[in-house]
Image (cartoon, coloured by chain):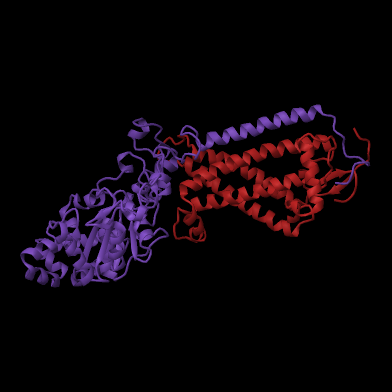
Amino acid sequence: MSTTRTERSKDTQGESLHHEDLSISQILKERGVSRRDFLKFCSTVTAALALPPSFAPSVAQALDEVKRPPLVWLEFQGCTGDSEALLRSANPTVAEIVLDILSVDYHETIMAAAGHQAEAALDKTITDYKGKYFAVIEGSIPMKDGGIYGCVGGKSNLERARQVCGGAAATIAIGNCASYGGIPAAAPNPTGAVGVKEAVPGATVINLPGCPCNADNLTATIVHYLVFNKIPALDGHGRPLFAYGKRIHDNCERRPHFDAGQYVEKWGDDGHRRGYCLYKMGCKGPATFHNCPTQRYNEKTAWPIGSGHPCVGCAEPQFWDVMSPMYRRLPNVPGFGIEHTADAIGLGLAAGAAGAFVVHGALSAMRKDKEPGEDAKED
Amino acid sequence: MSDVCKVKQYVWELPLRWFHWINVLAIVILSGTGFLIGHPVTLGASASDYAMGWIRLIHFVAAYAFTVSVASRVVWAFIGNEHASWRAFFPMYSAKGREKLRHMIRYYTLQTHEVPEIVGHNPLATTAYFVLFLIYLAMILTGFAMYATHAPGGIMFKSLGFMYSHFTLQGMRLAHHFGMWLIFGFVINHIYSAWLMDIKEHGGEISSMFSGYKFTVKKGE
């Protein structure tokens, strides 16, 4: 996977061109991935796309016939966590296949090329494959002060995003930063960070938020495009419905404990050890749409709630501001200290009102008021 | 004590009284179950129990009853008698209404000893009720928007789409909690004012919400 086309074109340009004409299954064969592993991958990705199993052969057939689409991966204002999530996929076949399906022409973190050579490769891809390549954007785009807070090769992230996303067949905003600004956009957002769709409103953007994004959802999104030749159905926040169509709370393995009324009260208590519901520990599963419970991370071995930590809502817009405090059910009330929960303030208001009326009542009781009578004026 | 002979008047029609008491019952149930949903206690002995499930079911059933009742009251504002009319909720827009409102405010702020006699709604109260209706609307919208997330793509979720594009679920949750406290504040005020006017007016203020009849010096509004 570290062999990008940039590197190849340096050594053996002829082979590289030839390589592009090969179908995916031929490439996999060359790389020593068995037909069986390929079919297994097709079944997995069919499941990730929430398609019935009968679609797996169609997926396999479509991938057999499809030519490798070029892909450029741009790293903006982010922590590279999504690249890491992809690269650290433990089971080699899936991750390898992702990158083998795609011809990754530019990826700052993993490409061998550097400096002007790398920038030239990017320019070449976006010119030669205009309207055909995929762009994957990782990290937010700083907009403040003309976008000077994020520059690569003398060009601001905003400038590059307009250029690259504008000419792409589709742009995949990977991670919460690229989708909605993520952590860089958290208050007070010093760099004016925004997501790709906000920075380049004209681009076709698929948001794959998460902190980090689940690499399986990236694979599935790309496969969806290759198989159906269109982007998957999106929700109101631009996220594919196959991965973000259900709440975590509704697919959670701890949901029976929620319905039963069994909750973790504090870290490490008996309920925590027994795997009870993390609702009272501030779990944001009821406010978060993501397929974590079914897809999971690290080759489907683990995910936060499965490991005993409440969901922090990382797949939702502005999660760092909106979902905090992480270990409380409700947000803080602006203007009050963190010890004042909404209900404490509400109780104070109600008690204040009651007190005021007790005083008013006492005063009214002591007064000799004139009851409405014949002489009372009509009102 | 006045010895004036008072006139019996039918003020609150039967449907209106029903809406009032359904709202009372629904708000009590919704607040009780709402507390348990916001701050659950471990009630389940085994994972096969359904304590929270039932609590939420009761909350949702009461929510539907409340919504239907509030919606019916709004419809009744257009078909009910003059006291139930929507016009009563905007005293600011008529000279007479403003005069009554001024007198009421003067009385409540202890500036006059003359108890105003009002047959139907007190203009200060209707102004508060209008705000209360807005709180009800906010509670209904945030409540159903949170509820509908169990079936994204469903009819309810789609018709509440504007809620999700304008507010976050956490924001709605916070507003839903505050709404309850505002309603509690209103209830304290409401019960106190009814008690005060019942004592001062001698018009059967409290019993009128059961019987529909009030007692006034003069026949008419």
Q: Position of residue A179 (x, y in %)?
A: 34, 55
Most distant residue in the left direction? A11
Confirm whether residue A239 shows in the render. Answer: no
Residue appearing at x 43%, y 46% in the figure: A322
The answer to which of B90 and A214 lies nearer the viewer is B90
The image quadrant of residue A279 is top left
The image quadrant of residue A207 is bottom left
The image quadrant of residue A216 is bottom left
> Does A60 appear above or below B121?
below
Quadrant for the N terminus of chain B in the image? top right
> Does B130 appear above or below A351?
below
The answer to which of B46 and A89 lies nearer the viewer is A89
- The picture's colour for chain A is purple
On the rendered structure, is A337 left or right of A369?
left
Residue appearing at x 69%, y 54% in the figure: B73
- The picture's colour for chain B is red
Confirm whether residue A67 shows in the render. Answer: yes
On the rendered structure, is A36 left or right of B45?
left
Q: Position of residue A183 (x, y in %)?
A: 34, 47
The answer to which of A120 and A164 lies nearer the viewer is A120
Residue appearing at x 78%, y 49% in the figure: B98
On the rendered structure, is B212 left or right of B63?
right
On the rendered structure, is B118 left or right of B76?
right
The answer to which of A63 and A199 lies nearer the viewer is A199
Q: Position of residue A53 (x, y in %)?
A: 28, 63
Q: Position of residue A239 (x, y in %)?
A: 36, 59
